[in-house]
Image: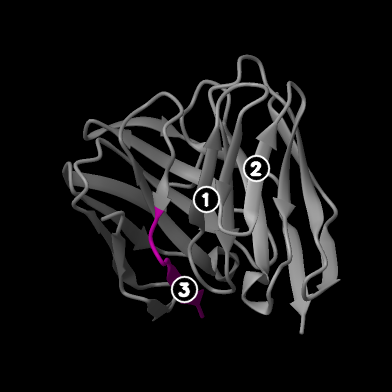
Amino acid sequence: DTEVTQTPKHLVMGMTNKKSLKCEQHMGHRAMYWYKQKAKKPPELMFVYSYEKLSINESVPSRFSPECPNSSLLNLHLHALQPEDSALYLCASSRGEGGNEQYFGPGTRLTVT
Amino acid sequence: EDQVTQSPEALRLQEGESSSLNCSYTVSGLRGLFWYRQDPGKGPEFLFTLYSAGEEKEKERLKATLTKKESFLHITAPKPEDSATYLCAVPGGGADGLTFGKGTHLIIQP
């Protein structure tokens, strides 16, 4: 089973709202990732968690706050977003660091109004 | 800086018309090259990993190959359901997130 699940599938939020995106995998993977994908663009890395520790933060604005409660779960907390943050947010997981293939979830389509 | 360049940006083929997609890369110490398929509004679907020059992998109508500078995704006798965006990616820099090319948007016409 190579399934990564994400909830919700769609999210509409105002610029003053606080919301969270959730991601789950049960493949025993020890690395998890958040990517942002704008229309007709490739995914762009936001955060990497390796063994439940944040190892990379690609200079993402602080209005995005990741959290990894355990090795199977990954959250992305959203606060005071801007309309330009509207995008498809993708979660992925891999066995660990070092060039292992990543498996992606279906994404959360976020619209900021 | 690691770079991944895909060509063509878009490709329209007739059903059954074979072709190849290109992914050229410049990385310091390749730790894998990955191919993904992405349908509109969905997450990328993993297809292949290639690690060393000369390596080939196949899956149904798709075959991926790797040289020291580029990778090819060969599509043999494609069907309309092969229509998608095909992305190649490499582990980026000192991080283990992926750096993606811009993708090839493939359309197979019946």
Which residue sits at x=54%, y=28%?
B32
Which residue sits at x=37%, y=76%?
A9
**Mark 2 or 3: the one toward you:** 2
Residue B3's disc number: none
The alpha-carbon separation of the residues under discs 1 and 3 comes to 23 Å
Which one is in front, A85 or A98? Answer: A98
Which one is in front, B36 or A51? Answer: B36
Which one is in front, B88 or A54? Answer: B88
Residue B64's disc number: 2
Query: Would you place residue A72 above or below residue A41 in this image?
Result: above
Q: Is residue B51 left or right of residue A24?
A: right
Residue beneath disc 1: B47
The alpha-carbon separation of the residues under discs 1 and 2 comes to 9 Å
**Mark 1 or 2: the one toward you:** 2
Q: Chain of mark 1?
A: B
Q: Amino acid at mark 2?
A: Ala
Counting from the top left corner in percent of width and height, residue B82 is at 64, 69
What secondary structure is found at the residue carrying circle 1? Answer: strand
Q: Are dots 1 and 3 on a single chain?
A: no
Do the numbered discs 1 and 2 sit on residues whose CB atoms are within 8 Å?
yes
